[in-house]
Image (cartoon, rainbow, N blue to C red):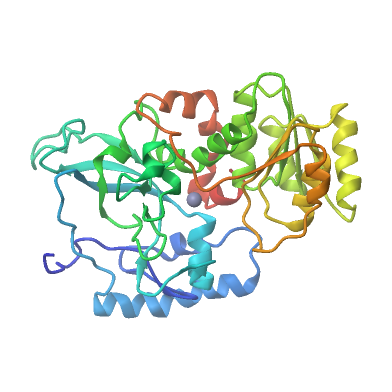
Amino acid sequence: MAAPAKDENLSLVVHGPGDIRLDFSVYSWLSILELCRPGWPRTQISACLCLSSAGIKAWAEDQENYPIPELGPNDVLLKMHSVGICGSDIHYWEHGRIGGFVVKKPMVLGHEAAGTVAKVGALVKHLKPVKMAGADEEGDRVAIEPGVPREIDEYCKIGRYNLTPSIFFCATPPDDGNLCRFYKHNADFCYKGLPDGVTFEEGALIEPLSVGIYACRRGSVSLGNNVLVCGAGPVGMVTLLVAKAMGAARVVVTDLSASRLTKAKEIGADFTIHVAKETPQEIASKVESLLGSKPEVTIECTGSESSIQMGIYATHPGGTMVIVGMGSEMVNVPLMHAAVREVDIKGVFRYCNTVADGNFHACIEDFECKALSYPQIPSGKGCRSL
Ligand SMILES: [Zn+2]
């Protein structure tokens, strides 16, 4: 590794619970405050403000200026342009861990990303780097798939590479993410299909859209289905978009937040249910009465126990319940209710095979993500209200 050079590769780095560092010489106070989501409790906002001291310290000591990575033969060096802030990034910042993934050494955040190819490894044929200084031609604009298998094991061979235990995944400890100026990635997991007119910000959100695509595929959503989406956060929203695009006749979305449900309606939900104090069974029967029958597919995006229970009660006999939301390890569910009605319960771990060159038009234009989410990002609302 080359020695770090000043201003080479400034990075946003989590060091442990509540300890995130970056160089305040390049990030404005405003952009840091944009990390605070609307409606966050004051403690979180003040945690955000506390960044200042850590950030200034980092700047003084030049800690967050990483070396520009050396390339292997199948790698590309990307000049990063846009990186989304995901719930998992926030979680690593606040708690220093997600389940068994613990931040034990400083880790660069970020996995929803797009950038420009700056340099390619010796064996990379399909991506074009930026020309040498002076030329005005740009390198290929790419979106990044953050999970890259390290070995061709049994899971890779059957196309389920997301399950390979040794997978590299951006910003999952100990693997660094790409919220930095320059980032090295496997060329086969960089997708250059970003059409003209599609921005880098839109390219970055291909990653969360992938979660919705994969969840709907796991549920086998198809033409004419009734679908229940539990939760109207970002993942619930992209799941709704994808379910409609895959031909779902009607989609019901549930949430605790009225404003999220209003957004869900705007982007295509046929019905919404504002969850308050009803029991899971009561909400399930509301779902059935709105649709006129139980949904063939339920996609649970909250991870909350009562919502998972509700999803099982609500799903049509012979239907499928997909668990996307991450909650407690031990969850009480009416399992026999699912078993005797042959409701299949399927898990989801990230995604695989959701993005390929040429799919970007489908992702961006058909699902109209652009109109829905991106204009809100500059105002700091993108994460919350996609
Ligand atoms: Zn994410």
Residue at 18% x, 33% y is 128
Residue at 70% x, 47% y is 231
Residue 26 sits in quarter: bottom left
Q: Is residue 3 left or right of residue 342?
A: left
Q: Looking at the image, can residue 256 be seen?
A: no
| Observer-nearest of 331 and 88 | 331
Task: Quadrant for the C terminus, please.
Answer: top right
Residue 332 image point, x, y percent: 77, 59
Residue 361 sits in quarter: top left
| Observer-nearest of 188 and 236 | 188
Q: Is residue 116 left or right of residue 129?
A: right
Instruction: Give the answer, above or below, for where 285 lies relative to 334.
Output: above
Task: Quadrant for the N terminus, please.
Answer: bottom left
Residue 203 image point, x, y percent: 40, 37
Residue 280 image point, x, y percent: 86, 50
Q: Is residue 93 left or right of residue 289?
A: left
| Observer-nearest of 77 and 356 | 356
Considering every residue shown, the one lying at the far top of the view is: 223
Q: Looking at the image, can residue 279 be seen?
A: yes
Instruction: Give the answer, above or below, for where 311 lies relative to 367.
Output: below
Residue at 11% x, 37% y is 131
Q: Is residue 203 left or right of residue 247?
A: left
Residue at 27% x, 74% y is 63
